[in-house]
Amino acid sequence: MQRQRPRPPRNPVSTEPGEVQLDFVNKLLGDVPITHQTETRALDRADRVSTTQTTMYRPLATAPQLRRLESDRGLLLCGRLPPAWVRLRPWFADRKLQRLAAGTATP
């Protein structure tokens, strides 16, 4: 009997995402609250002011936004912490990081 090789996991941010992949990315990243405050003043002489505050939620990033990221940018996901946009630095472009990766770095 021939063993079947396991399939690699599908990339949730593929070039042609389907509904499942888009839903996965949106749930993984979550939403960010956006608060908007509106102030309304009465036209009479009473100087009445009414303030309304609303909170809307929008996705942190969508799959198309992630695909359009610059090559030196990334989104860091770590446990229960909120996602963070980061600047990437390739290890092979930095001598200190090259030595660290090779195990020859000195403290």
Image (cartoon, rainbow, N blue to C red):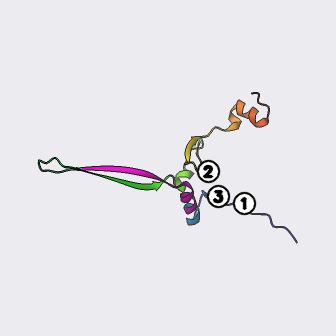
Tell me where residue 72 appears, x and y as whole percent.
59, 41
The residue that appears at 12% across and 50% down in the rendered structure is: 44
Q: How many marks?
A: 3
In the image: residue 40, left or right of residue 19:
left
Quadrant of the drawing holding the C terminus = top right
Number of other residues with Cα within 10 Å of mark 1, as a class: few under 14, some 14 to 19, many 20 or more: few
Q: Which residues are magenta?
A: 23-39
Q: Amino acid under label 1? A: Pro
The residue that appears at 76% across and 32% down in the rendered structure is: 99
**Residue sitting nearer the eye, 14 or 23:** 23
Of the image marks 3 and 2, the number of the one nearer the N terminus:
3
Tell me where residue 40 appears, x and y as whole percent.
23, 51
Q: Which mark is residue 8?
A: 1
Q: CB atoms at circles 3 and 1 under 8 Å apart?
A: no
For disc 2, the marked residue is: 79
For disc 3, the marked residue is: 11
Element under disc 2: loop
Q: Which mark is residue 98?
A: none
Tell me where residue 1 appears, x and y as whole percent.
88, 72
Write down the quadrant of residue 16 in the picture. bottom right
- For residue 98, above or below residue 68: above
The residue that appears at 55% across and 62% down in the rendered structure is: 23
Residue found at the far bottom of this picture: 1
Write down the quadrant of residue 70 in the picture. top right
